[in-house]
Image: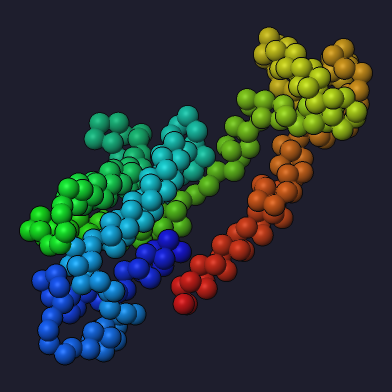
Amino acid sequence: MTRLEDCAKRLNECPLGSGALAGTTYPIDRWETAKDLGFDAPMGNSLDGVSDRDYAIEFLSAVSILMMHLSRFSEEVILWCSWEFKFIELDDAYSTGSSIMPQKKNPDVAELVRGKTGRVYGDLISLLTVMKGLPLAYNKDMQEDKEPVFDAIDTVTMCLPVFSAMIDTMRVLPEKMHAAAGHGFINATDCADYLAKKGLPFRDAYTVVGHLVAACGAQGKTLEQLTLSELKQVSPLFEEDVYEALSLETCMGQRKSYGGPAVEETARQIAAVTDFVAAHRNA
């Protein structure tokens, strides 16, 4: 939002009165015409007023970045919908069945937004390519500036509300997420931190946990499934409290640093973003 607002500041200069390239001999008031048309000011140089397309390129760059983020989010949604993850389930209104597999539910909106991103990138590259070798001031090549800008606007304004509605209506499956988080030794760093807090240098704690992970891999266990006796064979610093330290809730809850995933910190971040959006929406 702020990137587009910054773009608007540079966009809002009026070229009217620049003439073909060198202004005019008539006694016009460019400030008055700029004001009447809702611009902040006239462009400061008549040659620039005719030949400049930076504002269009900057706008296309901003919406390309916007689409890049939508595309990455779409990729997450597509993965999370798959049977391998199954972290979320999309509403039927934003997905379709497969042409051949009756059990399949395709995340169409996410896939289309991901694909449309390439189109907006193309709009940016198209205008950059048009402009790259042009001498000052106006050249007929520059009539090609309109189509990519209008196409990008149409594409982005089509993608945003549909994507938002898809997110609003999707169903999150936290039990699947919790089960997935229990694998892959996601709490191995916390195990090393536990030993470091007991006085073991972190590099040694790192080595200890590496041995434990190897043992778990051989036995098909997770760290928290090892007995206290097995843990003590590797380090005598382990005590009963290690199991609480290794729980997923503790691992997440202790990450209370600014911007971290602890519940209270996540709530603060959500509130900050909500306030930001509300302030800019009303601006």
Counting every numbered tag in the picture gives 0
Residue 76: x and y in percent read 45, 40
Q: Quadrant of the N terminus?
A: bottom left
Q: Residue 119, can we see it?
A: no
> Coloured how?
rainbow
Name the residue: 65% across, 51% down. 259
Which residue sits furthest left? 140
Q: Considering only vertical position in the picture, is 278 above or below 203?
A: below
Residue 21: x and y in percent read 14, 70
In the picture, measured across the screen, residue 15 lies left or right of residue 265, that is left
Name the residue: 84% across, 25% down. 201
Name the residue: 33% across, 44% down. 114
* Residue situated in front as seen by the camera: 44 or 82: 44
Residue 237: x and y in percent read 91, 23
Q: In which quarter of the image is residue 204?
A: top right
Q: Quadrant of residue 145?
A: bottom left
Which residue sits furthest top? 218
Residue 137: x and y in percent read 15, 62
In the picture, measured across the screen, residue 180 lies left or right of residue 222, that is left
Q: Residue 282, can we see it?
A: yes
* Residue situated in front as seen by the camera: 238 or 225: 238
In the picture, measured across the screen, residue 200 lies left or right of residue 266, that is right
Name the residue: 78% across, 28% down. 191
Q: Considering only vertical position in the picture, is 215 above or below 53?
A: above
